[in-house]
Amino acid sequence: MGSKFGFYLSALLVALFTSSVHAQQKAPAASTFYLDKTETQFSLSLANDSADVYIYFASPAYSWVAVGFGASMENSLMLVMYADARGDNITISPRLSTGHTEPSFSPAIKLDVLNGTGIYDEMYVLRAVCHACRVWPNGFLETSSTTAPMLFAFGPAMAAQSDDANAPLRRHVRYGTFSMDLVAATGAGAGVPEANAQLRGAVVQGMSKDRDGKDLAHAICGCIALFVLWPVNVALAGFLRNIKVHVGVSVVMLAFLVVSFALGIATSAQYNRSQAYRSPHQIAALAALVPSLLMAVLPARSIAALSPRIPKLHMPLTTLAFALLVLSGGLGLRLSLSSTSLVVAYVAVALFVAAFTTSVLLCVRRRGSAYARATTRRRLGEEDEQDLGMARWGVGKKLSGSSSDGSWEGGEVGGPYGHERSTSQGSFVVGRGTMPGPQYLMNMHPGVPVYVNGQK
């Protein structure tokens, strides 16, 4: 009996010891941040005998989510997560940020991903141990702090799948900060914390919406210039005789383009993919500056007078600038990771505006612009439609000149539809005929001289 009693006692002690060990392993020292609005949890456990940092992170499956060590993005270490290319697991990307810009992947951060990491019930779940997360360039984790600064961010709610640890990110839609007690998170039995929907050793400091709209304003200003002011200006240049209206609209359109370019430059500095100005969008935009500047400079009288070919360059330069700017806009949508529906809508609007402007330009090429026709008539000493309308109301217009150089001198209105003129070759009537008859038919084109029998 005694031996059996001793055996059972030993087994009981072993079981109690084993359960105690398992209890310690299941509940390591940890501090936990929990955000009720998104059910986001971030827990840390620090080993006091090594530099390892044990991490548990869970958050809704936005395009990307991130948590970081630091008071702000500048000089912070961030763990960014997004779906992999197949969409059934996650890509973990340790990144460093040098300012209020997109963080860059850092292969120096050694992160071992453990079992239980993946996408579960539309939640990103990370279980990992980091061997190089306590010290990073221009920053470190203050393990003796009870209020260590931390930050988090959420990308937009859209599909973004990639196996690339340095995949481009769209700007976050929400971000926030919290503090964490790292003293309470440090212990001998460090390990990956378990899921816990309660704050423990952490204080939520707030969450904000992203209000930076420079990229949106950049796109809106560019679209107004291309798809509103540009076709209107082409129509005004073709059908109005007052060239000052065309010039005024051109100045307004140029102002929108300048603002769009300035906002684009400011936006480019925020993303890794655009900081070097080597993207197709930026190359096309810079190339469009050449014909745009030439369009603004060549119409100057001092330059246009250098050669009769210079004014003829205006229409080809207009077409080239429009094509490059529209191409740049489409490439910009791709650079900004815009949705397919937005790209399709942009292409549809661009094709419509291109068809409209092409039709106007072809019409102007056949007829000549209203301004050019009016200028030519004035240079040749002919009346335009406005003078004809004045004549119909009985308003006389006296013109004087020498008959030897082809000019004429008119007197009073020769009737309700024309002026009588006299030259060295004889008298003739412009814009007057007898109806019915061939003279009336010829008078349907203003300015065609009809010689009246009996007048010399």
Image (tube, rainbow, N blue to C red):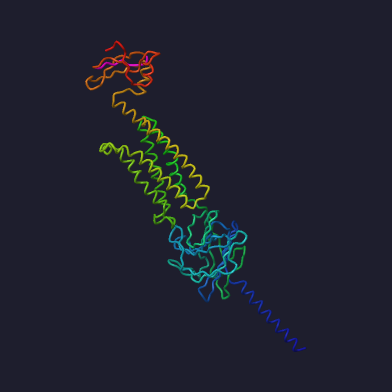
- x, y percent for residue 321: 38, 43
Magenta span of residues: 416-423
Residue 353 or residue 424, whichever sits in front: 424
Residue 77 or residue 240, whichever sits in front: 240
Asked if the magenta segment contains residue 164, the reply would be: no
Image quadrant where residue 43 sits: bottom right
Rendered position, 433 above or below 122:
above
- x, y percent for residue 318: 37, 40
Q: Residue at horizontal 33%, vertical 31%? A: 372
Horizontal placement of 424 versus 82: left or right? Answer: left
Residue 43 or residue 78, whichever sits in front: 78
Q: Quadrant of the N terminus?
A: bottom right
Q: Quadrant of the C terminus?
A: top left
Horizontal placement of 49 versus 5: left or right? Answer: left
- x, y percent for residue 4: 75, 87
* Residue that lies at the very extreme toward the left in this rendered image: 404
Q: Residue at horizontal 57%, vertical 59%? A: 87
- x, y percent for residue 398: 29, 18
Rendered position, 217 above or below 61:
above
Q: For the image shown, how many numbered marks are present on the structure?
A: 0
Horizontal placement of 156 versus 236: left or right? Answer: right
Rendered position, 34 above or below 243:
below
Image quadrant where residue 440 sits: top left
Residue 367 or residue 245, whichever sits in front: 367
By secondary structure, the bulk of the magenta-drawn segment is best described as strand
* Residue that lies at the very extreme toward the front in this rendered image: 438
* Residue that lies at the very extreme toward the top in this rendered image: 454
Image quadrant where residue 205 sits: bottom right
Q: Residue at horizontal 30%, vertical 26%? A: 378
* Residue that lies at the very extreme toward the bottom in this rendered image: 2
